[in-house]
């Protein structure tokens, strides 16, 4: 049983323009650091694929998907919200992000891997049922979770999201659906400032982190709030919105996690999955300081290799 690493070349066609923090070098920085640390040869490296439309339509409205196709520019950029540029290749890349995550899911559930990391862009967790936002078009993790439930008939799927920003889109799509437990930690109050950060849903555990929160308090809150909820839920699969922008060096948030906190998170999740003998899949969300991103992902993936 392997740890798989999935990515795809088509993400280069999602051109966010100069000076946008979400760009193709992020994936290259991750791969360069994995190679530098000797982790790369230990991974089962796989190429992603494009998405099936029925998978996307489990999470997004048909009108929304059609509208995105209509507004995609032939050249240059348009902005679908104040933060989210779309170029001629953006939707192709977004479809590959989805398809790569669902391919990784299918292969995990066939028993090909113990766990997998999908280095995808554009990210997905801010995309709501009928709304693009925060660099996201299609909600990769919600689509993957719905496929796990409706194609693979899993009954209990846990979603862990430790990105610095709350995955409002994931909550929008999966709220109150008790096949899914969403465990989320994020800077609060902070972007995306939606009601999902404070409202109560019966399948959502929000962990609010004050600006400046560091390692000790973060780990304490995860142990206190996530761990009992996860154990009580007893998932058959864990999906992770793996955003690395809560790092102290990241320019997009004001949290103060260190490389070692991503080692700790990878170890914590992997130990639970090894103990319960369940598969897990992490997909990239945020992380915008290239050096911190490469190091943090490498610390995280090194723990995925532990058996
Ligand atoms: Zn983020």
Image (tube, rainbow, N blue to C red):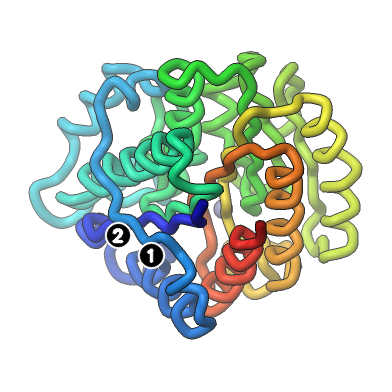
**Residue 69: where, in percent of width, then height?**
18, 32
Q: Position of residue 124 (x, y in %)?
A: 45, 42
Q: For the point 51% across and 51% down, which residue is it?
A: 1
Above or below residue 30? Residue 108 is above
The residue under label 2 is: 16
Asked where in the image residue 11 lies, by quadrant, the reply is bottom left
Q: Residue 134 carries which label?
A: none
Which of the pair 276/155 is nearer the observer? 276
Q: Residue at x 55, y 31 (%)?
A: 170
Residue farthest along the bottom direction in this orientation = 36
Q: Which of 154 and 137 is in front in this view?
A: 154
Q: In which quarter of the image is the C terminus?
A: bottom right
Q: Is residue 282 visible?
A: no
Instruction: Choose between 163 and 298: the one closer to the eye.
Output: 298
| Residue plotted at (70% across, 46% down) | 274
Q: How crowded is mark 1: few (under 14 residues within 10 Å), some or many (20 or more)?
A: few
Is residue 115 at all visible to an observer of this figure? yes
Whether residues under marks 2 and 1 lie with C-beta atoms below 8 angstroms apart, the answer is yes
Dot 1: element: loop
Q: What residue is shown at x 39% (from left), y 19% (from top)?
A: 58
The residue most toward the left is 74
Q: Quadrant of residue 198?
A: top right
Tag 1 residue: 20
Residue 133, by quadrant, is: top left
């Amino acid at each position: 049983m392997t740890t798989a690493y999935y990515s795809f070349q088509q993400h280069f066609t999602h051109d966010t323009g100069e000076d946008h923090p979400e760009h193709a070098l992020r994936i290259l920085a991750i791969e360069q650091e994995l190679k530098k640390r000797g982790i790369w040869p230990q991974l089962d490296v796989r190429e992603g694929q494009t998405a099936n439309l029925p998978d996307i339509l489990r999470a997004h409205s048909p009108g929304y998907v059609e509208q995105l196709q209509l507004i995609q520019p032939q050249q240059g950029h348009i902005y679908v919200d104040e933060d989210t540029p779309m170029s001629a290749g953006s939707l192709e890349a977004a479809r590959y992000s989805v398809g790569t995550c669902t391919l990784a899911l299918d292969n995990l559930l066939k028993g090909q891997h113990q766990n997998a990391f999908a280095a995808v862009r554009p990210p997905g967790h801010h995309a709501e049922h009928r709304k693009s936002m925060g660099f996201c078009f299609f909600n990769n993790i919600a689509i993957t979770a719905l496929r796990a439930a409706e194609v693979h008939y899993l009954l209990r799927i846990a979603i862990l999201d430790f990105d610095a920003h709350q995955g409002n889109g994931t909550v929008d799509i999966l709220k109150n659906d008790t096949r899914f437990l969403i465990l989320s930690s994020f800077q609060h109050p902070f972007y995306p400032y939606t009601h999902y950060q404070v409202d109560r849903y019966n399948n959502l555990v929000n962990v609010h982190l004050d600006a400046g929160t560091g390692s000790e308090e973060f780990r304490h809150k995860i142990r206190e709030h996530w761990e009992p909820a996860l154990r009580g839920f007893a998932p058959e699969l864990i999906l992770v919105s793996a955003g690395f922008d809560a790092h102290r060096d990241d320019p997009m948030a004001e949290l103060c996690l260190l490389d070692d906190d991503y080692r700790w998170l990878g170890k914590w999740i992997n130990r639970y999955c090894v103990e319960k003998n369940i598969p897990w899949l992490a997909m990239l969300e945020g992380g915008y300081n290239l050096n911190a991103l490469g190091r943090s992902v490498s610390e995280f993936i090194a723990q995925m290799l532990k058996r």
